[in-house]
Amino acid sequence: MKKTLSVVLTSAMALSMFSSLAFAKTSADFTDLKELDAATQAKFDAMISAGIFDGVSDTTFGLKDEMNRAQFAKVAALIMGLDVNKDVQTSSFTDVSVTDAANGYALPYIEALKTAGVTDGYAEGQYNPAGKVTKEQLATFLVRVLGQDAAAKGKTGTDTTVSDWAQGYVALALDLKLLSNGTDGKFGGMANATRDLLVSGAYEAKQQYVSAGKVSVTDAKATGVQQVTVNFNKPIDTTKATLALTKGTADIATTVKFADDKKSAELTLTDVKVSEGSYTATLSGLDAAGVDKTTATFTAENEKVTKLSFVNASDKIAKSAKVIVKVKAENQYGENATINGGSYTAYVAGASQSLTRNEDTGLLELTLDTSAKQSEIDVIPVNVFLTNSSVSVQKTLKVGTEPYVTKVELGTVKYPTGKTALSSTGDVAEIGITRYDQYGDIIPETAIPTNRTDYNSIITPYSFDALKLVTGDYDTVKISLDKAVEKAGDYTVTIYVGSASATTTVKAESSKIANKVEFDSFSGVLAHGDTNKYIPIIAYDANGNKLSAQDIADQAAAKRFTISISGATAATGNNGNDAIVQSGEHKGQIKLDSIDASANSIVFMNLGIYSANVQNNAQQSFTIQEARKPETIVLDGDNPAQKALAGATTTVKWFVKDQYGEKLDKTIADYDGDYKVLVTVTGSTYADFTGLGSTNLTQAADKTYDFTATHLEDFNSNDLKFTALTAGTAKVEAKLIQNPGTANESILKTIDSSMEVVANNTELTYSLKPVSDLYATLDSGVVAAGEKLMTPASEWVFNGSLGRKVEITAKNTSGDEVAIPAGRVVSAASSDQNVAQIAQNGGDVVVIGNKAGKATITVVYTLADGSAKDETINVNVKADQVVTAAITADGNNDITTPTVGTTTIDAYKLLPNLKIVDNYGVEYTDTELNRYADLLGIQYVVTDVKGGTVTVNADHTITISAGVIEFNVKAISNGKTVTTFVN
């Protein structure tokens, strides 16, 4: 063979013809296709309906017939959508003639291929129209359709049934699942291809085909009252693509669902309905080089009712005090219209009557009283129409006999939130129940006496009353898990109403009962004199599933465990179960109230489960370390600038660490006189000092402070602050001293921080700190009005958290940071006030975002020598809504709860160090948590209250009643939570 049929399919039309033609026949019209499976039939239907293939006769497709090159030329030309001139009478090939009875019909298609550069024949000047098409030629054709010619040439193969030149094409066709090997594992590439292979192979290629060229939005249109469909010219990368919908200049909130073929997307409007006006769908997120048209505009109309129809099961209704006649109102999209019932008028036997719209079904409902009518004699004409329109429907209903239940339907079983089965005692599954009368209509509540609509149940297999029917509603059956089940299983629930019944399945999971316990790893240190230490444990149920901390706490409350401890004090009630923490960050752990054992001795713990069916035990011992003592003082945070101009402030924080590397707030009483921290402040002439002392007042003279070993918390992590006064050096120094005041006194650690106040004429280099991204606060519809005030008030832009303060930094010629006083800004201006604006208060400036975009801020500020400097910084304002990115707080809060009366406190104060960081990096703490509670969607939940009551109030405060011992308080924001145990 001199050459194969050369098929280079680069046209974007290559496979579009699959859907461009319409033929009446399907696979069902051919006797030799009827035995194909449904999936294969669907492939053949696609090819037949596109006009690519037809049968060899009216009833036979010719499934296993071989194709010659003439037939193949026609198929190739049609698939590619080539321009075929059917009037051409002369061929470029000497062996192709219009007078050829068998293959002459193919001349126009062969010429189209030749003109398109797809083929130059079989041999010099010849096409060989009667020649067969081999399987390896077919594989080559399909691979080139997908534009994979280069990839195929880079592959190799070893199939002896395939020609050397075709090995790569066949290997790739197999990899892409376009074709498959025979039952012998060979491809048989030199065998002739049959029609079934071409059909199925071309179909598979179509699924993977991506047309050449850039992505474009082809069109968009309303396809539902809250739905817009956007179409693309080719599949898009749905991992990057985003779609937005606007009406005029207004953004329309939507959710987006891309089609499986990635060639279209459905936008569901979340807040509003499609209404009259012009809409634009915009595609973004993709590489700009690969995108052409990114928008599509369409004109929509208001929802309108196009059709009304009765949907009751028959023309006869029951004789009853309450009969519901249902009417379907259909809108222009074929949906149930959302227009409310008050927009319709009903005439029943000539009298006007109102309709309501059932929000669950979307149907209109007309409630009739037919109890006074004569059964099987009286009729009721009903006329329903959309008020002030011609859309109407009429029907004459015949009154039948009194209703009785002939059929019961049960809805989907609904389990407690977050569950797929009943798993905890008290869990309830809810099942909707619908009763139908003899005419197929729903029997509403109170339509007939309750003794004819009441339901009862049979639950199998029998579970010793673990599952029970409990009191529900007329429309809801409730099944409760009253007792723990030993084994997970499906229970059949049959509901009876009179002689009618319906069955459903309720799932129950085996209760999370501990059958095995272990001590988990403990990485901390137990030292003599320690208090409130927590030992983690692990428990497993009978199926080997690990129990959660809550499960362990529940099991302890049920007295499942037996715990004994020596060498430490812990709660002993209920066989030691009271030692397991019931709430808070240490929930499910064993709490050791105090470590009594001396250094180098042992704390021994025994944890077991002893029941009729389970005998399990775990033991753990801990070697007690020497009591904690101070070892060093370390920096808490960053070191402040050591140089400053007069008026500037710096802050430093330190804390004491023990010999185990942990923060130490106090030692045992025995060490109280053995250690102390001595803080010395010098240079009070040059800088004021605050941060220590009960009054925290500025010290007018040099001073020392003593902190004994049992009161180190008074020193730890305090803000030690210097405020520069005049040239000179002030210093705060902390010494950790062992055996103070004795002959054996020694200094274990000295740490200090200085403030050298330099002259105003010191050579400094000034610069503005970059401004981080801003939220478009002023343009926002969700930000409180006070946060947008540009003039001074108790709450305004300047003292809020949504703006960015302009900060000036300075360095000396050595590159050292020099603290400078605030309030240096003379003026500031925005290059575009539509994007960002300025709020100035004295010598300080805050930049506030207005609308999304970029701008520059030019700031003029004074230097220490009195001269001025101007500098410009960039700002980027974004419209992304402010949301919580992270939320943190301390896990425990030991407070004195009220014993008499009640106390109301800001909720955030119950979660020590509660901090929220938003998506712009802004931190919210203390009073800011109340100020921005609505913007951030902050909520509080209280659980596990012991003694008294704890109430969360709407103003973000919490009221604690007398007698409260402990509780958990959880802060929630943007789906993120943090919990503090308060006791």
Image: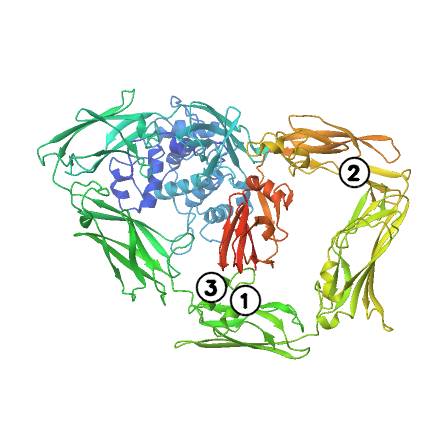
Q: CA distance from mark 1 to mark 2?
A: 50 Å
Residue type for callout 3: Asp
Which residue position holds label 1? 589
Mark 1 residue type: Gln
Q: Tell me where residue 585 appears, x and y as whole percent.
A: 56, 60
Residue 343 appears left or right of 705: left
| Mark 3 surroundings: few (<14), some (14-19) or many (≥20) residues within 10 A | many
Could you say whether the residue bearing mark 3 is in a helix, strand or loop?
Answer: helix
For badge 2, the amino acid type reads Ala
Instruction: Say the numbered circle drawn on residue 213.
Output: none
Q: Which residue is mark 3?
A: 551
Local secondary structure at mark 2:
loop
Q: Quadrant of residue 24?
A: top left
| 474 is higher (above) or lower (below) than 324 | below
Q: Residues within 10 Å of mark 2 (few under 14, many from 20)?
A: some
Mark nearer the N terminus (1 vs 2): 1
Of marks 1 and 3, which one's residue comes earlier in the chain? 3
Mark 2, residue position: 822
